[in-house]
Structure formats: structure tokens, C-alpha cells
Amino acid sequence: MNLKCKVREALEASNESKRKDEIIQQKEIELSCALGQVQNAQEEILIHSKNAINLKALEVDNENILKQLSHAITNVNNVTSERDFLSKELSEVQFLFDEYKSTSGKEEEIELIQKLKEEALSAKKISHKLEQQLDLWRNESDDLKDEKIRLLREVAQLKRESGIEETTSNLLDPKNSPSINEVDAGESKLTTSEAALIKCHIELYHDDVRRANRKFEMNDKEKTMLPFSDS
């Protein structure tokens, strides 16, 4: 808004400068006429130098003309100085206006770049949090694997102690793991407490396997949803 006012003032000043240029031209014409009058007066003084009465009157006229000439010269100098000042001010306003036009586009570009940087930083933080959550789930999954192996070993140990011959490696796959019905079928070979303990361990083992499978599925889904890693 200040720039528009400044430009408007500069245009008004330019118009005022043009008007004063016309005044200067008019004053120059008047000055030329005055110089002609002075010259004529001097010629008349030379012509009528012998006439004392006319000479005195001409001298008075000459003084008046010289005063007018001095006043006209002063006005011309003042108008010229003011015109130079207005011209300089107009140049400064034009420079500011050009600077404003050249920088307005850059400000929008800088603002867009800053916005993109902020969005990238936010996405990076979200990705980092998701990676941390994924690592946490992986650790939990490893813990579940360790617990599953421990339970399998306990079940195998119980079976060895109970006389059931089955290798631990067959239990690593849930499809090959003993079911509760199988334990029921073999209760005739075990005591009541041993069969109940084995059934309890097998139930816990199945629960852990199902829980671990759910965790793995969730981890795979979350990993595919990650926008990008922090690499």
C-alpha cells in the first residue's frame, strides 16, 4: 500500500515537474524578452546619453528591469532544483517497485519449499515411530519364539519321562504338534497328574503359536504400510 502511494506521489511529482518545465520555458522566454529590453534600454541610453532627464528615467527603468531579471533567474534556479529532486525521488520509487516485483515470486517459492520440508520432516518422524513400533513387535515375536521353544522342550522332556517316543523336531510345526485328543488317547500310559500337565503345556503351546502367527501377520501388514524408512 505504501508502495502504491509512493508511486502515485511520484507520478504527481512528475506531472508537477512537467508543469514547472513549462514555467521554466515561459520564464526563459520572459528572460529573453527582458534581455532584449535591457539591450534596447542600453541602446536607448546610448542614443539619449546627452539628454540628462531622459537618461535618469532610463536608468530607473534599467534598474527595474535588472531586478525583474534577477527575480526570474532565481525562480528558474528554484524550479530546476525542485525538478532534479523530484526526478531523483521518482527513480528511487521505480527501483523499489522493481525490487518488489522481482521478490514477490521468490517469497511464494520459498514458502512452498518450507512447507514441503515441514511435511517431509513430519513424515520422517511418523516413519521413525513406526519403525520403533515394528522393532518392538519383532522383539516380542522373538520372545514368543523363545517361549515356544522352551515349552516344546518341556513337553518333549515330559514325554521322554512318560515313555512317549516322539522327537522335539516334529513339534516345531503346529500341524505336527500333539493335540489334546492325542494326549487323551495316551492317558492310559500316563498318570492323571502327568496327563493334566502335558495337556496344560500343549494348550499353552497352541495359544503361543496362534499369538505368534497373529503378531507376524500384523508385522507384515505394518511393514507394507510404512511410507519410507529412515535410511
Image (tube, helix red, strand yellow):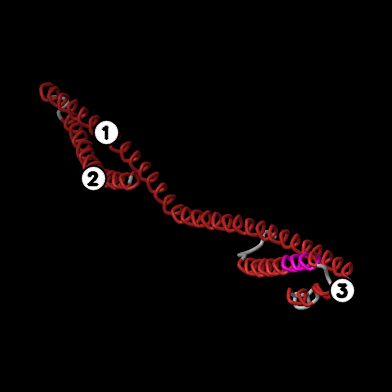
In this rendered view, identify the residue nearer to me: 184 or 217.
Answer: 184
The correct choice, above or below, for 21 with respect to 138 in the image is above
The residue singled out by tag 1 in the image is 73
Q: Which label was assigned to residue 185?
A: none
Evaluate if marks 1 and 3 touch, with contact meaning CB atoms under 8 Å apart: no
- The label shown at residue 19 is 2
Residue range in magenta is 194-204
Mark 2 or 3: in front is 3
How far apart are labels 2 and 3 at the CA level?
120 Å
Left-right relation of 158 to 78: right
Judging depth in this view, the residue of 103 and 60 nearest the camera is 103
With 209 as the anchor, is 186 left or right in this view?
A: right
Name the residue carrying label 3: 164
The residue lying at 28 percent from left, 37 percent from top is 79
The residue type indicated by label 3 comes to: Ile
The span from disc 1 to disc 2 (Cα, nearest Å) is 18 Å
Q: Please, is residue 201 above or below residue 122 in the view? A: below
Q: Quadrant of residue 57?
A: top left
Circle 2 packing at 10 Å, graded few (<14), some (14-19), many (20+), is few
Q: Quadrant of the C terminus?
A: bottom right
* Residue at the image point whose x is 67% and y is 61% from the top: 134
Amino acid carrying label 2: it is: Arg
Please state if 34 lies on the left or on the right of 144 as rendered: left
Quadrant housing residue 225: bottom right
Q: Give x and y (percent) for residue 9.
A: 29, 44
Q: Nearer the viewer, residue 1 or 216?
A: 216
Relative height, residue 132 to residue 84 (above, below)? below
Whole-percent x and y of residue 211?
68, 66
For label 1, the SS is: helix
